[in-house]
Amino acid sequence: MSSATTTANETTSEDRSNQSSPDGLADVLEQMKANTDGDQVTLEDTLDALDSRSFGPLLLVPAIMAVSPIGAIPGMSIVTGCVLMLIAVQMIFSSGRPWLPQRLLDFSFSRETFAKGIDKSMPWAKWLDGYTDRRMEMITQSPFHYVIAAIIAFLALLFIPLAFLPFAVAIPGTAIALFALGMTVRDGLLVITGFLVSCAAIGVTIYAWPF
């Protein structure tokens, strides 16, 4: 009886975990918008909006913010780059929810601008979700996720110099978003696409250096 109760509790816990985990990019955007309120939104608010401990969604939030119209907010590229790099590094060494400096988490911006950016991003998010599926899942899991994390950390580092070039952050940001979405929905094809976009990001950085 005790064993059956334990099994039932574990199943319930898993079900709750699955319910809170986003199903795709559009779902991530919807949760970010629905679960935040007030005139100002902090980076911590957006991460907490997903109620997820998985690295995929946690990486996806700042990546989306970097490549969407929200990225036009002054300082957003630097902040999201630092957050992505810290999460990716901790993804290599830890399985728990990553630690982030409170100063980064307290970075705030207008919720109106935030909501408008999500609304503008929603059509292409739904379009992309239409092409995602569970494919080549092994690429999204261990040991490959260590390689993905290392590449994400390097791409996030590129945010700092590329932040001074108009829209340049969108290239490494897109690569990171593809990696993160691939890990979230277990789509290895998206991860492979992320690798290809990463090569483009490195090429743009080399071409643009020095500014």
Image (cartoon, rainbow, N blue to C red):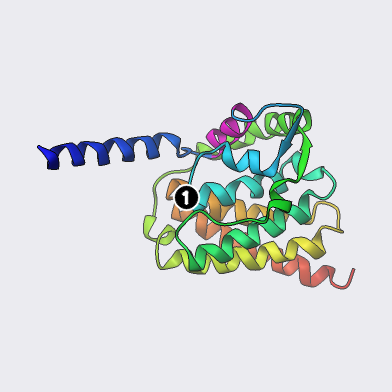
Q: Is residue 11 visible?
A: yes
Q: Residue furthest front?
A: 2
Q: Disc 1 on helix, strand or loop?
A: loop
Q: Residues within 10 Å of mark 1 (few under 14, many from 20)?
A: some
Task: Read off the residue under disc 1.
Answer: 54
Tally the marks. 1
115 to 79, vertically: above or below: above
Name which residue lies at 79% across and 56% down: 168
Q: Quadrant of residue 46?
A: top right
Name which residue lies at 32% across and 40% down: 14
Work out which quarter of the rendered image holds the C terminus and state it. bottom right
Residue 178 placement (x, y as % from top left)? 57, 52
Residue 100 placement (x, y as % from top left)? 63, 56
Prevalent SS, magenta region: helix
Work out which quarter of the rendered image holds the N terminus and state it. top left
Residue stretch in magenta: 25-34
Q: In the visual, does 110 lie left or right of 178?
A: right
Residue 105 placement (x, y as % from top left)? 69, 48
Residue 142 placement (x, y as % from top left)? 40, 64
Name which residue lies at 72% across and 48% down: 66
